[in-house]
Amino acid sequence: MRDPVIVPFNNQFLVIASDNSGGIGMKEKDVVQVPYHIVSYYSFRVALMECMAASAVPVSVIMQNFCGEEAWGPLIDGIKQGLEELELSIPVTGSTESNMELLQSAVGMSVLGMSGNAPSDERLPLKEVKTAVIGKPLVGDEVIEQSEWVAPLQLFKQFCQLGNLTVLPVGSKGIAHELKLLFPEIKPENIHAGLDIHKSAGPSTCFIISYPADMEKIIRSIAGQLFHEVTVTVPKS
């Protein structure tokens, strides 16, 4: 996988995925004003999704808090919310910068996972699969205002466990960027979707799935209204 660090460890593989946020929180100079439990929840989900997309089972969470000591409790609450949604019980640790008071909020998040198999970038050829985006790319205040279009963690987990497909969280560089990583042979003009393929997905509010055509019915059934078909044309050689 492209983002997590993969480290061989005791005949298994340690998967380390990270995320950070800045200028989002409850400080006067924050660009986006939201409670700290929401800040940590969405930062946690990014790192978690990257970890799970690499076929790893999350085993620990590490948080770096630059929002102040009073923010620690709410930040932990946001992580717990994410863990509860996935029915996970894993340790959470971290540190708070308490010597210096920052003008804006900042949080760093890492999720550690373990996998019995080496994560692989192998995939079916482009011409043999279909592609879809689950959820919508949202950023900033949109994440709160249009929360019904944010792909739930439980849904992401369900697709990761389905097998025979590729699951890829969409980050700040947008759908087209992630599809280019998945299919290096394509160009933006090869991608056709009813979504803005260049827009930031903020805290991974959506994700890409690539799957065999015979799985179309079950994919649509699971995703419901969050399913957005993407047509990726095969470039002419």
Image: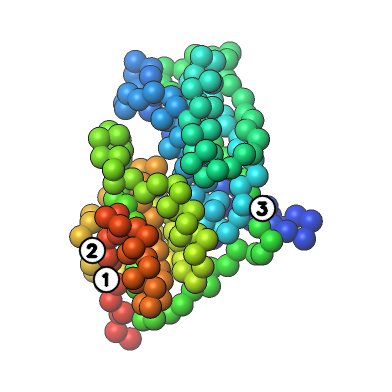
Location of residue 96 by image quarter: top right
In space, the residues marked 1 and 2 are separated at their CA atoms by: 6 Å
Q: Amino acid at mark 3?
A: Met
| Quadrant occupied by the C terminus | bottom left
* Vertical relation: 120 (above or below) 25: below
Residue lying at 30% horizontally and 39% vertically, measured from the top left: 147
Badge 1 is on which residue? 231
Secondary structure found at label 3: strand
Q: Nearer the viewer, residue 57 or 31?
A: 57
Q: CA distance from mark 3 to mark 2?
A: 35 Å
SS of the residue under disc 1: strand
Label 2, residues with CA under 10 Å away: few <14, some 14-19, many ≥20: some
- Residue at horizontal 33 percent and vertical 45 percent from the top: 150
Say which residue label 2 marks: 193
Residue assigned mark 3: 114
Q: Residues within 10 Å of mark 3 (few under 14, many from 20)?
A: many
For the residues bearing labels 1 and 3, Cβ distance under 8 angstroms:
no
Give 185 or 61, whichever is nearer the viewer. Answer: 61
